[in-house]
């Protein structure tokens, strides 16, 4: 299904960058994305929306709408991660199992794969169009708000990449990295926030367990001890 390469269920996360699609051009151009691709495509969109918003409102109104857009993104981030990325496929449906692997399963199987840590632009474009159409009722306010949404998305994708492939030096950075890696290795049904734990707190998926007290050591976080 979806021209996916064979992907047996793994008993634990692995390193490497596996073949995802059997169609070479799809594998090369649509399944492998780096952070600079995301910046090159979506930063101009955010700036253009900011420009359109600025031509319709004053600076304070623009700033307020942008801030609201960033805040709105954190909520959408939580909803997508919890209810779309982590939807539970039926064991009787090959279509659902393959869709689950395609959407997010491969990232949990190979969490260190540098080519599959940020969202493919094709997927982001579908989400962006859906959000834009759904909020057209905002009228002229939507431009600056949408600029904030896109900026929030950039914050999310770059943060996600950073948490997997950097060594934070600040207390906040170390805490957020630990929070996300515990989601990967110990509690995939909790800790859905990437940029912030706010919505985990709101919706009761912020556990107070022993894992968050582990040191910022990848091997120990993976082992859970």
Image (cartoon, rainbow, N blue to C red):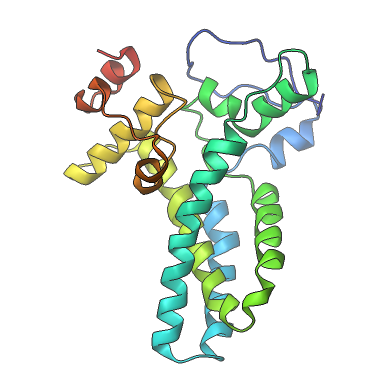
Q: For the N terminus, which image quadrant?
A: top right
Vertical position of residue 175 compared to residue 217: above or below: below
- How far across and how far down the image is residue 112, in percent? 46, 27
Q: Which residue is drawn at 52% across and 77% down?
A: 144
Q: Which residue occupies 59% across, 25% down?
A: 106
In this view of the protein, can residue 172 be seen by the observer?
yes
Image quarter of residue 178? top left
Name the spot of residue 222 as percent of width and height, x first: 34, 17
**Residue drawn at the location 52% of the way across and 63% of the way down:** 149
* Front-lying residue, 40 or 6: 6
197 vs 194, nearest the viewer = 197
**Up/down of 41 relative to 183, above or below:** below
The residue lying furthest to the top in this view is 11
Going by the image, does 151 lie left or right of 85? left
- Examine the rendered structure and indicate whether residue 147 appears above or below residue 80: below
Q: In this view, does 182 lie to the left or right of 154?
A: left
Q: Position of residue 157 (x, y in %)?
A: 48, 48
Q: Quadrant of the C terminus?
A: top left
Residue occupying image coordinates x 66% and y 10%: 8
* Residue 196 seen anywhere in this rendered image of the structure: no
Q: Nearer the viewer, residue 192 or 155?
A: 192
Q: Quadrant of residue 174?
A: top left
Q: How many marks?
A: 0
- The percent coordinates of residue 123 (x first, y second) are 68, 47
């Amino acid at each position: 299904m979806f021209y996916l390469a064979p992907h047996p269920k793994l008993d634990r996360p692995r390193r490497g960058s596996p073949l995802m699609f059997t169609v070479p051009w799809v594998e090369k151009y649509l399944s492998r994305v780096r952070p600079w691709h995301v910046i090159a495509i979506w930063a101009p969109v955010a700036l253009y929306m900011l420009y359109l918003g600025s031509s319709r409102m004053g600076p304070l109104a623009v700033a307020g709408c942008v801030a609201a857009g960033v805040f709105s993104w954190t909520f959408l981030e939580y909803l997508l991660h919890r209810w779309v990325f982590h939807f539970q496929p039926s064991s009787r449906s090959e279509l659902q199992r393959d869709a689950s692997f395609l959407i997010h399963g491969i990232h949990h199987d190979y969490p260190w794969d540098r080519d599959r840590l940020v969202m493919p632009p094709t997927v982001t474009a579908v989400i962006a169009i859906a959000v834009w159409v759904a909020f057209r009722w905002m009228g002229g306010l939507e431009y600056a708000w949408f600029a904030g949404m896109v900026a929030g998305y950039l914050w999310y994708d770059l943060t996600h990449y950073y948490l997997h492939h950097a060594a934070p030096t600040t207390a906040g950075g170390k805490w957020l990295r630990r929070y996300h890696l515990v989601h990967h290795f110990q509690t995939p049904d909790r800790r859905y926030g990437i940029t912030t734990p706010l919505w985990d707190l709101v919706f009761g998926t912020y556990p107070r367990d022993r894992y968050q007290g582990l040191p910022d050591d990848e091997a120990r976080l993976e082992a859970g001890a």
